[in-house]
Amino acid sequence: SVDRNKRYTGFLPLRDYDYLGMWTKPLVFMNAGVVPRPAGFSINDLETYNDADTVTNLILLGIGATWYPWKDEHKGSVSVNAFSHWEASQHYKWDTTKTQPSSIVSTLAADGTTSGRRTWSGWYDKTQEAGQHLGYEFSAIFDCEVNKRVSFTSCAGVFFPGQLYRDLSGQPNANTGYWGKKIEDSGSGVMSIVNVDEDAGLGQSISYGAYARVSYEF
């Protein structure tokens, strides 16, 4: 089949590149721009592509609070934020025990033999819709004006994956390549299949990060 003439149920906002929010700032999802959001499984390429740096197909609900330790609010502030993220479009659950169509089996076998890429097991289940919840994000931001020329900023954030990542566990992804079974050359020119433990998909690990910055104005 060909990936065309399909109805898209998400949305495409304008001027969303590098959007960081106004009153609440989703640091992990928008500022860092590295948490991949599954955009849909491609029958042609046999993997799922992702979006990470725009708000396309993203629904978020956030709440935040800011405290000003000094009388002069320009001296600095401490902000905390909490978010819940969803995808607007619907995915099907990935079933690692489901039998793949015969055409897909042939394609994987040919691809693995010629390129040594990793194969995988399972297929999507059209009878079950995957959850749309991406997960929860919590972040904190500290800003401080040391003097007229020097300022200091530090940020930290953590993301807890939601039901969507669990329902797509095992699905091959563009970020991870083919996993599940690894086709290796034993040295004699014969390709053999070796089982490995890695997840074919994006996984369900907690993502976190932090940074600090000192700025000096000349």
Image (cartoon, helix red, strand yellow):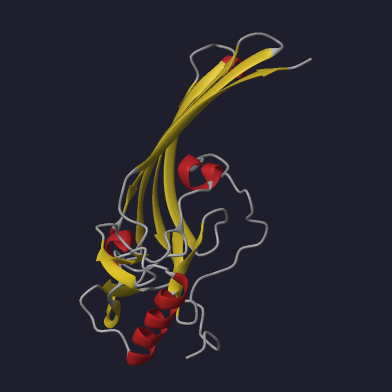
Horizontally, is 196 left or right of 189 in the view?
left
Q: Is residue 144 above or below residue 131?
A: above
Determine whether, in the image, residue 157 is placed left or right of residue 123: right
Res 60 quadrant in image: bottom left
Question: What is the number of callouts on the image?
Answer: 0
Residue most extreme to the front: 188
In front of the other: 93 or 132: 93
**209 horizontally vs 11: left or right:** left
Between residues 188 and 91, which one lies in front from this camera angle? 188
Q: At 40% from the left edge and 54% from the top edge, which residue is drawn?
A: 85
Q: Nearer the viewer, residue 215 or 194?
A: 194
Relative to 95, 110 lies left or right: right
Instruction: Measuring from the top left, give residue 39's x and y in whole percent.
Output: 47, 68
Identify the residue at the far right of this view. Answer: 218
- Can you give x and y, in whole percent of width and height, for residue 194 in the image? 26, 65
Q: Give the vertical position of 214 relative to 108 (above or below).
A: above
Percent from the top left, x then y, of residue 167? 28, 66
128 over 173 or under it: above or below: below
For this rendering, which residue is in front, 84 or 214? 214
Q: Residue at x 43, y 46 (%)?
A: 62
Q: Quadrant of residue 177?
A: bottom left
The residue shown at (51%, 78%) is: 8
